[in-house]
Structure formats: C-alpha cells, structure tokens
Image (cartoon, rainbow, N blue to C red):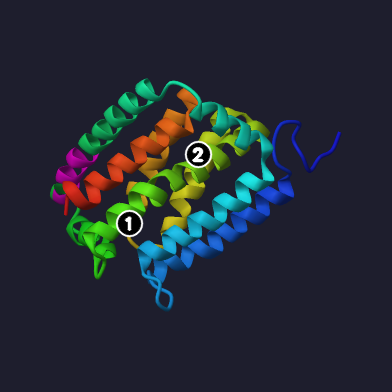
Amino acid sequence: MNTTRSSAGVSLRTLGLILTLAAALFVPLFRVRRIGPLDFWWWMSATLALLLALAYSADAGARRALAGDLRSGWAWKLSLGLLSAVLLYAIFWAGNELARWLLPFAAGGIEAVYGFKSGASVPRMALLIGLLIGPGEELFWRGWLQRALGKRYRPMAGWLLATAIYAGVHLASGNPMLVLAALVCGLFWGWLYLRLRSPLLNAISHTAWDLAVFLFFPLG
C-alpha cells in the first residue's frame, strides 16, 4: 500500500505543500494586512484564487464532488445556506454582547477586526466578498481541505483538524477575538459540511454571513 496517498484523496506531500503555501500567504496577511499595493481584500482574494487553482487542479475527487454539487438542489441549498447564515449571525450577536460584558479586551479586539475595512470602499468589499472571498474560503477550507483530511483520517477528524488549521492561521493577527471568531466559524461551517457535504451550501452561508457581519449589519 502506498503510504503517501490515501485510496481516495490527494497525496500527503501535495496536502503538505498546499497547506505550507496557505500558511505562508495567510499568516502575513493577518499580521500586516497589506503588501505593496495590495490591501487586505485584494491580498485575500489573490491568495484564495491561487490556493483554489492549486488545490482543485491536484484533486480530481474534489473537482468531481464540486461539479456534482453544482448540478442539483440549488433551491434547498440556497434556502438552508441563508438560514444557516442567519443562525450564525445570531450566535455572533449574542456572543458579541456577552463578550463585551465579560471580557475587558473584547471591545478593542472587535474594533480591530473591523479595522480590516480601513481604506476599502464598500462596493469593492461587497464585490470581492460575494464573488471570491466568501465562496473561496469555503471551497478551500471545507470543500477541499476538510474533505481531503476526512478522506485520509475519517470525516470527524477531518472536521476538527481543518477547524484547528483554519483558526490557527488567524493566530498571526494577535487578536484573541478574531481567533475565537475563526474557531466558532470553523466549527459551524465544518459541521455543516460534515453533515450535508455541499460546498455550494457552505459557500452561500459564508458569503451571506460575511456580507452581513462586515457590511450590512456590523457588530462593531
């Protein structure tokens, strides 16, 4: 038996290389937020475009799963995706109120998260979130990474490992509130993917939540 490749997934080497590249791109993104002319939103978009191209070109199974997911069930996936975004927003609204009451540093951490919007126009953020960042994060972290880890180590382990990695890259921000938010989101969307196996549904949920929490109904 080949120990570097599972029977139904990408090789361990490919997985490691793409994750190393993801860390090399995401860690400085959350640390410094800008590189040359690229602000956070352009940098995030470019990073996801590159990672998605590499991940899906290396994983025929993920490509087939995504193609199959896109062929049917749009109505229920749209409905459940939007409902799940509303539920997650409600969780964050309650958590925001509780954190500000219990944690002295919470208000500053939440304000720092909204600092990512500094200098970016609302139309540009909405366009990038709607077309690339929201869908792209789910296609990479859940549709590719969680799927690949689940194929290799069992689905539950894939969920927990992908969530840990997703939250882990946010540690570079030095903001406990952002890391906590990423952990909650990773667990929520990872569980959604674990149960329903629909990258499309996850992408709708993530995109709607991003637009609500960053632009339309901010919590900060």
Q: Amino acid at mark 1?
A: Pro
Q: SS for tag 2?
A: helix
Q: Residue at x 29, y 34 (%)?
A: 85
Badge 2: residue crowd in 10 Å (few <14, some 14–19, many ≥20): many
Would residue 171 be counted in the magenta stretch? no
Seen from the viewer's position, the closer of residues 172 and 40 is: 40
What percent of the width, then of the height, locates residue 205? 34, 36
Q: Residue at x 50, y 39 (%)?
A: 142
- Tally of numbered tags: 2
Q: Amino acid at mark 2?
A: Arg
Q: Which mark is residue 12?
A: none
In the rendered view, does 152 fall on the left or right side of 67? Answer: right
Q: Which residue is mark 2?
A: 142
Q: Residue farthest to the front?
A: 71
What percent of the width, then of the height, locates residue 157? 57, 33
Would residue 99 be counted in the magenta stretch? yes
Could you tell me which quadrant the N terminus lies in? top right
Q: Is residue 191 visible?
A: no
